[in-house]
Amino acid sequence: MYVPHTEKDKEEMLKAIGAASLEDLVKQVPSKFLWPEFDLPRESLDESQAAARLTELSKKNCRPLSFLGAGAYERYTPAAVKAITSRTEFLTAYTPYQPEASQGTLQAIYEFQSTVCALYGMDCANASMYDGASSFAEAVRAAVRITGRRKIVYAAGVHPQYMDTLRTYFAHSPEYTYAKVPMKDGVMDKAALPALLEGAACLAVQTPNFLGLIEDMDGVADAAKKAGALLVAAADPVSLGVLKTPGEYGADFAVGEGQSLGLPLAYGGPYLGLFSCKKEHVRQMPGRICGMTKDKDGKRGFVLTLQAREQHIRRDKAASNICSNEALCALAATVYTALLGPEGMRELAEANMGAAAHAAGRLSSIKGCSLKFKGPFFNEFVLAVPGSAAAMRERALGQGVDIGLPLAPLYPELGETLLVCATEARTEADIARLEKAVKEAI
C-alpha cells in the first residue's frame, strides 16, 4: 500500500494523538490479519498473461451443491431484479440529501419501507440497516432506551451471530445483563418466561429460530407486557408468506435479514437489515425514514422525514450511529417482492417448506439418521447423524456436496447433528444427490 506521508509526518501525527506507534493504533486486531503474506508471482505480467493466470487459478475453485442455510440462503432471483438495480440512476446514486434531485431514489426507499411494513405487519419501517444482526441489536438497544432497564432476555434459538453483534453494543457497560430462555424440544420454553422477564427491558425471539423450528408466539407478547418489557421479534421475511406476522402476535419491534429477497450469497454481503416497529416507537428507530408529501403546486413528492442519526442531531440525542442504509440492496428487495406479490410470496414459502420436508423425509430414512426435533420447521431442520458430523461433511465435500452445518461447536448439547437447509432452489434430483452423499459419508 502506498502512503504519501513521510516518517516525520507520521511521527507528528502519532505525537498529536498520543500513540507511540502505528502498531499501537491497531493492536486489538490479530496480527495474522494485519500483515498477511501473499504468495504472489515475482515476474511482471502483461494484461493477457495476467488474465490467463487468473483463469488458471479460478479452475481451482469448487462450488459444491450446497445445503447450508443458517441465516444466508441460496434462492432463485428473477432476471428483472438485476436489470432494474443495474440502471445507472440507481447503481451510481448517492445519499438522497437533495430531494429535488433524488425523487427516484426516495420513491424506491418509500416503496421499500411500505413493503417491509406489509411483510411484518408493523406500522413503520426505516430505509434499512447493514444486515439482520445490526437490525436485531438496534431493536434491543431501542427497547433498553424506552424502558430504562438493563436486563436483556433472549431465546436460546436466536442466531448466535445476532447475539455476538448485540453484545458488542454493550461490551464496555458491565451493568447490562443477559438471561437466556432455555430450549425445550428445540424451541423456547415458554414456562420459564415469567421468572426470567422480571425487570427485563425486552424479550428477543427469532422465529423460525436458528434451528429452523417455528416458535409458538401465542401469549408471548402478553407475558412480556405483563412484566413491563417489550417484544423484539426477528423473522425470515420469506417465512411470513405462510406464518403469522410479528404485528399479528404483538411485537413492538420486528426485524430480519433481507438477503432472501433477491440478493445473492456474495461471500457474506452486502446484506440488508429489515427494521420495523409500532408507531409509538418511531422516534427510537435508527437510520432514516422516507416520507411522502406534496410540493407547493400540490404534486406528490418524496422527502427524508425522520433522521435520528448523529450526522444530523447531537450525538447524545441520536438513536444510532449507523449513518447509511443499504439502498441498492433495498431496491433489489423491493423489486423482488413487487414481482412476486402476496400470492407469490405465499407460494415461495410453501415451496421452501415442501423442499425441506422432502429432504427431511429422505435423510431421516437413512439408517442411523433421524430428525432431532419433531416440531414444525421452515426451510431447515436438525438431523442427528451417527459419528462425527464434521467428518461427514468433509467427506461429502470431497464428492461435491455440502450436506449442512455441524452444530456441535454452537450447541454441544445437541450432540452430533447437522443443520440442513433446502430452499426452492433445490430440486428433487438435488435432494436425491444429498441423500446419496450422506449415505456415502456415513
Image (spheres, helix red, strand yellow):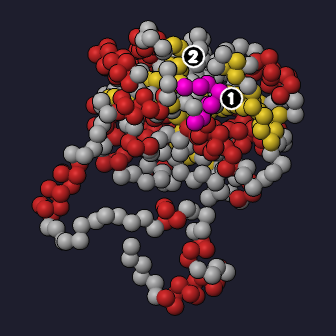
| Left or right position of 365 against 29 | left
Q: Which residue is mark 2?
A: 372
- Residue 237 versus residue 80: which sits nearer the camera? 237
Residue 280 location (% of width, % of height) = 74, 33
| Left or right position of 46 against 170 | left
Task: Tell me which residue sits at (57%, 16%) in the image.
Answer: 372
Q: Residue 226's quadrant in the figure? A: top right
- Residue 256 versus residue 178: which sits nearer the camera? 178
Q: Which residues are magenta?
A: 409-416
Q: Residue 358's quadrant in the figure? A: top left
**Residue 43 is a magenta residue:** no
Amino acid found under the numbered disc labelled 2: Lys
Q: Which mark is residue 156?
A: 1
Amino acid found under the numbered disc labelled 1: Ala
For the question of whether residue 96 can be seen, the reply is: yes
Q: Residue 142's quadrant in the figure? A: top right
CA–CA distance between discs 2 and 1?
Answer: 16 Å
Element under label 1? loop
- Residue 112 versus residue 389: which sits nearer the camera? 389
Q: Would you say the magenta stretch is mainly helix, strand or loop? A: loop
> Where 212 falls versus 41 (above or below)?
above
Element under label 2? loop
**Residue 411 is a magenta residue:** yes
Q: Quadrant of the N terminus?
A: bottom left
Task: Tell me which residue sits at (48%, 14%) in the image.
Answer: 368
> Where 41 falls versus 167 (above or below)?
below
Q: Which mark is residue 220?
A: none
> Where 426 falls versus 162 (above or below)?
above
Pointer 1: residues within 10 angstroms few (<14), some, or many (20+)? many
Task: Tell me which residue sits at (14%, 56%) in the image.
Answer: 52
Residue 317 location (% of width, % of height) = 74, 54
Residue 245 location (% of width, % of height) = 60, 19
